[in-house]
Amino acid sequence: MADRRSPGPWGSFRVVVPNRVDIAGGTLDIYPVYLLLDGAMTVNAALSVRSVVEVRPFRRGAARLHSGNYGIAATAADTHGFPLEGKLGLLARALRYYPPVTGVDFRVRNEAPVGSGIGASSALLVAMMLSAARLTRKGMGWEATARAAMEIEASHLKNLTGRQDHLAALRGGVQGIRFLAGRIEASRLPPGGAAGRMLRSHGFLAYTGIAHRSSDVNWRMIRGAIDGDGAVLRKFRGIAAAARDAWGAVSEADAAATAKAVAAEWAIRRTLAAGVSPAKVEALLDSRAFRRLVAGAKLCGAGGGGMLFGLLKSPDDRAALPPLLSGAGMSVVPFRLSGGARTEGVADGG
């Protein structure tokens, strides 16, 4: 067992990372799906919806982990002592990836609701890893961190997980990510560039009010691909093609073409597994009023609930959207883009 230690003199700090909206190609980032397809790609954009870990000194010979979302806390002798089960289990498992330290207090929170489908739990995992890396001086590059985060999460969930959430949290901006054997090719556009301005102008986000568990929905999608089901593989190839189209359109800041790719992706995804598109979502997307305003829309992540993302035909029609969403039992979430992870000092005792 490694000797636990104090991290030495240090000031309080917080790590802030973005959540993400997947524009097209979600699920293709899950091993081994991308190895079964040619040209697998995922396109996402980092949001100003944040996951935050605040780190402060704690009493000697102890460590504490507190979740603001769940209102629960655990105290242990060091950062390897937190339980691996329950609502703090994923973060506890992340801390065990790094050397144990004592005399530290972690306070964590997500701004997104549970089951939002925008990668909040994965982003919080990344924020915790970056916090622990700072304390232990065991930092890694973005690709190695994303891979480790994926495997920590899979170990906790006892299920297959992807990497796009972690990459968005680490790098921010708008990304086109190609998952290849043994490596990742991730192209990034800045949130303040032409692509970001187009998405901010036309994009919208709304919470459906339906929480979902992405691991359950994803497994129903990918089981057929792993089993070699030809129909499922054809659908995934169609999703990959839509993602490539989306990346080309986003790179050109072409709102109409981006929306077309989003709509094409969702038309396929909603048929992949039962429960991907709930009845209230189907009713909204099929309504004449919605189709008059929106050029393309989809549920984020694996679907089944969570956040609805879409692009307006005209930014001038934005004011007409909230009443329509509210009438469908959904609530608008401000759609703003973000850069990647950042670390900032905080006042001790504040």
Image: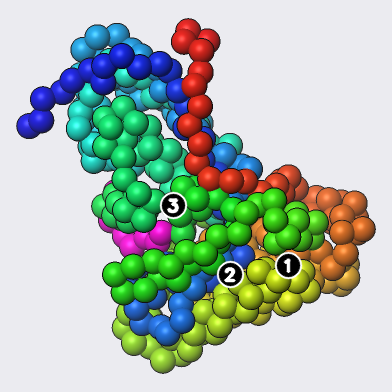
Going from the N terminus, do you reach mark 3 or mark 2 first?
Answer: 2
Residue position marked by numbered label 3 in the rendering: 166
Going from the N terminus, do you reach mark 2 or mark 1 first?
Answer: 2
Task: Label 1: state its secondary structure.
Answer: loop
- Label 1 – label 3 distance at C-alpha: 24 Å
Residue position marked by numbered label 2 in the rendering: 24
| Residue 280 seen in the current view | no
Residue 292 percent coordinates (x, y):
88, 70
Going from the N terminus, do you reach mark 1 or mark 3 first?
Answer: 3
Point 58% across, 69% down: residue:
24
Which amino acid is tagged 1?
Ala
- Label 3 – label 2 distance at C-alpha: 16 Å
Task: Label 2: state its secondary structure.
Answer: strand
Which class describes the residues within 10 Å of circle 3: few (<14), some (14-19), or many (20+)? Answer: many
Residue 276 percent coordinates (x, y):
55, 68
Residue position marked by numbered label 1 in the rendering: 253
Task: Label 3: state its secondary structure.
Answer: helix
Q: Is residue 146 a member of the stretch shown in magenta?
A: no
Question: In the visual, does 234 lie left or right of 336?
Answer: left
- Label 2 – label 1 distance at C-alpha: 15 Å
Q: Which residues are magenta?
A: 156-163
Is the residue 85 above or below the residue 266 in the image? above
Quarter holding residue 57: top left
Point 64% across, 75% down: residue:
248
